[in-house]
Image (spheres, helix red, strand yellow):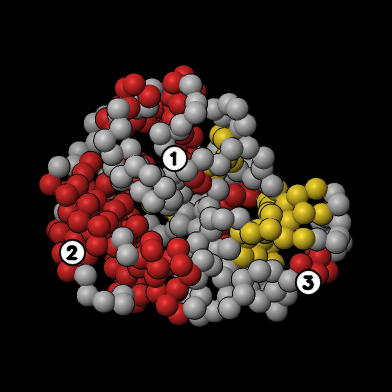
Amino acid sequence: MNADPDTAAVAQWVAGRLPGFDGPVTAVKFAGGQSNPTFRLNTHAGSYVLRRKPPGQLLKSAHAVDREFRVQRALENSAVPVAAMHLLCDDDSVIGSMFYIMDHVAGDNLDNPTLPDMTRDRRGAIMDEMNRVLAALHDVDITAVGLSDYGPEGNYFERQLSRWSKQYLASATEDIAEMTKLIDVLAQRLPADDGQRRLVHGDYRLDNLIIAEGGSRIAAVLDWELSTLGHPYADLGAVIMQWQMPQGREGRGLAGVDRVTLGLPSDDDFVKAYCQRRGLGQIDDFGFYVSFAFFRMGAILQGVKKRALDGNASNPERAMKLGAYVPMFANAGLQALRA
């Protein structure tokens, strides 16, 4: 099913709601956005971004673009940089699914954490800025920004393990023994609830950031679909999980990289800097949080594969390729628990 928006219908719906949004409108799809198709809207007045739910049958609670809109609007005056939110359309009849329109933020969107063709100093500065913004996110006063009801209370990891296990099983296309084992072991290693209930991004990584062109400042954090109230170590563990992946276009990790020479932080240094910024001590059993990140990403990729098989993927060929990595993520999750 075609996910490209009907730009004439978008322009008609926006008319009178957003000053400066002038037609005619053309749309260009961004290469990313496997989950929620994302487009640059070009108008006579300038550029905007439209992000929509994919068409077709969807898993319950998935592709929550309305939550993305709400959390980014709440953060507009916070220490966490986000694009300005403009309009949310919850009328599926306009283009076939819910969508929102936000500012287009100019800058560099990077997906290789080795940050090639940059100076050593800029590499280090970008990673330090990534650390600073993550700590700032987890220090957001959820009551002050109106997000105290953005997620349920209780043990976040217990809740998330249950949610993603169910979503994984709902999208399973074959039996993957490693994922079954990982789910069981994670359940046995669940940490006690330490009372940290913070806003978490859910997919905080380099390619979901816009970096000021030529600099190190983060201009916007993107892709808030998985955001909720939960435990901040889930985000931190996910950053380290990504870096433990293989180098290259597919893994986008730092495995085997000489980080000292490149000016990149070690996993331990990144965690220590984060803890210092938030006034925290040592994190016990950090391997659990890295393992959980591997598990959740495996569950997400299984969902991507299922959508491809059902004909609902934004990029079917890439979706099938990503889905083939599920066993690898499960094995990496088991290894992280043994580290």
Q: Nearer the viewer, residue 145 or 127?
A: 127
Q: Residue 208 placed where, x, y %?
A: 51, 46
Q: Which amino acid does label 1 sit on?
A: Asn
Asked if residue 91 lies left or right of residue 336, the reply is right
Asked if residue 204 lies left or right of residue 270, the reply is right
Labels 1 and 3 touching (C-beta < 8 A): no
Labels 3 and 2 touching (C-beta < 8 A): no
Q: How crowded is mark 2: few (under 14 residues within 10 Å), some or many (20 or more)?
A: some
| Element assignment for label 1 | loop
Q: Residue 291 placed where, x, y %?
A: 24, 51
Residue found 69% across the figure and 47% down from its top: 104
Q: Residue 34 placed where, x, y %?
A: 50, 62
Of tags 2 and 1, the one toward the viewer is: 1
Q: Nearer the viewer, residue 339 or 86?
A: 339
Q: Quadrant of the C terminus?
A: top left
| Element assignment for label 2 | helix
Labels 2 and 1 touching (C-beta < 8 A): no
- Which quarter of the picture shows residue 237? top left
Q: What residue type is labelled 2?
A: Glu
Which residue bears the numbered disc 1? 112
Which residue bears the numbered disc 3? 9
Which residue bears the numbered disc 2? 178
| Element assignment for label 3 | helix
Please report whichever mark, 3 or 2, sits nearer to the chain's N-terminal start: 3
